[in-house]
Image: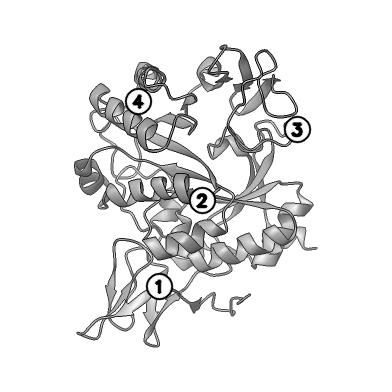
């Protein structure tokens, strides 16, 4: 395993050379073309010494123990704590970014914690976490670091989780997800117009990632869509999106509709009405998706997992806290025996909705 030097810089993978002398970064579909000394839009991948390097290996913007449901993942080791962290930068330019102080950062001093892969794995074990999540900013931009952390975690029996927009090219996609156990993919909308106007990216590569996860990997994944009033919240768009999920990914992929609040460069939009979230969930269920949830609002009934055959409440949640558990030891409904899709290990965890900020340096003492 290649470890970071004191500068946090390691050679990057997935790049090519152009005839005009520039180097193209081939990690994500943005395909940034760089002269010596330039950085990509993500800011953490740069051209130095005539190669692409990752400048944030071994450096984090901070750690926190969260409930796994906050990622959100409702069907992956429910009730367990996850050690969450990110770096700086992002390969999208979302006007509504709700982690913009990290993901849009151009200041490397935002990376406050020195965090070697082995130290992260040891911290997760010491804290009793069943998994480590790459989140806050998109882990595809720090692919080499994420892979190293995932490998170190797997050596200690700790699982790895990617919270991502899914904007990644084919070859790095294969390596990245070969080391992930679960993912939450942010399907930001279902129109190319939204993706280009609001995020300066494209829809089709994200759909490619979702198809790849479903049909070519064993990664457990769930989908999240942040509904923004007047932008991606029409009944027609949600109808088309959920029909696409049902047809291309199957009925067992959970989908989360979450509430927008004004932030970053989109302060002119109101908060998402509760009724819009309920409408989106209703359409998903009408299109026969088995598991649809709403988030960023308090609505325990619509955040509960139900058996899609008999309607029994299987996992009752209230603000990320599990209230009832009605799955048998095989992950099936206790009333009718129908399997509930997901990754379950017997009884659920008891972490609740606690949030625990962590400094790795303090754990090492």
Residue 358 on image: x %, y % = 67, 51
CA distance separating discs 1 and 3: 40 Å
- The answer to which of 74 and 295 lies nearer the viewer is 74
How crowded pointer 3 is (Cα within 10 Å; few <14, some 14-19, many 20+) is rated as few
Residue at the spot of label 2: 217
The quarter of the picture where residue 5 lies is bottom right
Asked if disc 2 and disc 3 are in contact, CB closer than 8 Å, the reply is no
Color scheme of the displayed model = one colour
Going from N to C along the chain, the mark reached first, 2 or 3, is: 2
Mark carried by residue 57: none
Q: Which mark is residue 272?
A: 4
Which residue is at 22% across, 48% downward? 196
Residue 260 in view here: no
Mark closer to the chain start, 1 or 3: 1
* Residue shown at 51% from the left, 77% from the top: 9
Q: Residue 346 carries which label?
A: 3
Q: What element carries label 1?
A: loop
- CB contact under 8 Å: marks 4 and 2: no
Label 3: which secondary element:
loop
* Image-quadrant location for residue 115: bottom right
Of the numbered discs 1 and 4, the one sitting upstream in the chain is 1
Q: What element carries label 4?
A: loop
- Decide: is 79 above or below 145: above
Label 2 and label 1: CA atoms lie apart by: 21 Å
Task: Specify the label residue 14 is tagged with.
Answer: 1
Choose top left, top right, bottom left or bottom right for residue 151. bottom right
> Residue at coordinates 53% horizontally, 18% vertically from top-left?
308
């Amino acid at each position: 395993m290649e470890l970071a030097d004191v500068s946090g810089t390691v050679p990057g993978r997935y790049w090519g050379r152009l005839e005009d002398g520039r180097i193209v970064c081939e990690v994500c579909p943005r395909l940034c073309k760089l002269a010596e000394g330039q950085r990509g839009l993500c800011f953490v991948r740069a051209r130095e010494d005539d190669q692409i390097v990752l400048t944030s290996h071994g450096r984090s913007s901070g750690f926190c123990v969260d409930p796994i449901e906050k990622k959100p993942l409702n069907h992956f080791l429910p009730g367990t704590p996850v050690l969450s962290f990110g770096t700086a930068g992002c390969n999208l330019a979302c006007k509504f970014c709700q982690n913009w102080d990290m993901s849009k950062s151009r200041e490397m001093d935002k990376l406050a914690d020195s965090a070697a892969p082995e130290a992260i794995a040891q911290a997760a074990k010491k804290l009793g976490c069943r998994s480590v999540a790459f989140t806050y900013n998109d882990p595809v931009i720090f692919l080499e670091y994420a892979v190293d952390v995932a490998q170190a975690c797997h050596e200690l029996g700790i699982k790895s989780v990617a919270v991502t927009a899914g904007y990644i090219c084919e070859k790095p996609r294969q390596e990245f997800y070969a080391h992930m156990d679960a993912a939450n993919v942010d399907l930001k909308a279902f129109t190319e117009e939204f993706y280009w106007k609001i995020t300066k990216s494209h829809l089709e590569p994200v759909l490619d990632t979702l198809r790849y996860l479903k049909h070519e990997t064993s990664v457990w994944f769930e989908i999240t869509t942040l509904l923004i009033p007047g932008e991606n919240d029409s009944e027609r768009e949600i109808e088309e999106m959920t029909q696409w999920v049902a047809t291309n990914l199957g009925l067992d992929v959970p989908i989360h509709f979450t509430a927008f609040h004004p932030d970053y460069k989109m302060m002119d939009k109101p908060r998402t009405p509760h009724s819009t979230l309920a409408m989106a969930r209703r359409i998903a269920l009408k299109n026969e998706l088995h598991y649809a949830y709403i988030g960023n609002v308090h609505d325990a009934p619509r955040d509960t997992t139900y058996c899609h055959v008999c309607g029994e409440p299987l996992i009752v949640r209230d603000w990320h806290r599990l209230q009832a558990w009605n799955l048998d030891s095989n992950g099936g409904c206790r009333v009718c025996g129908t399997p509930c899709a997901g990754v379950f290990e017997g009884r659920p965890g008891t972490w609740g909705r606690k949030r625990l900020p962590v400094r790795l340096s303090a754990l090492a003492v």
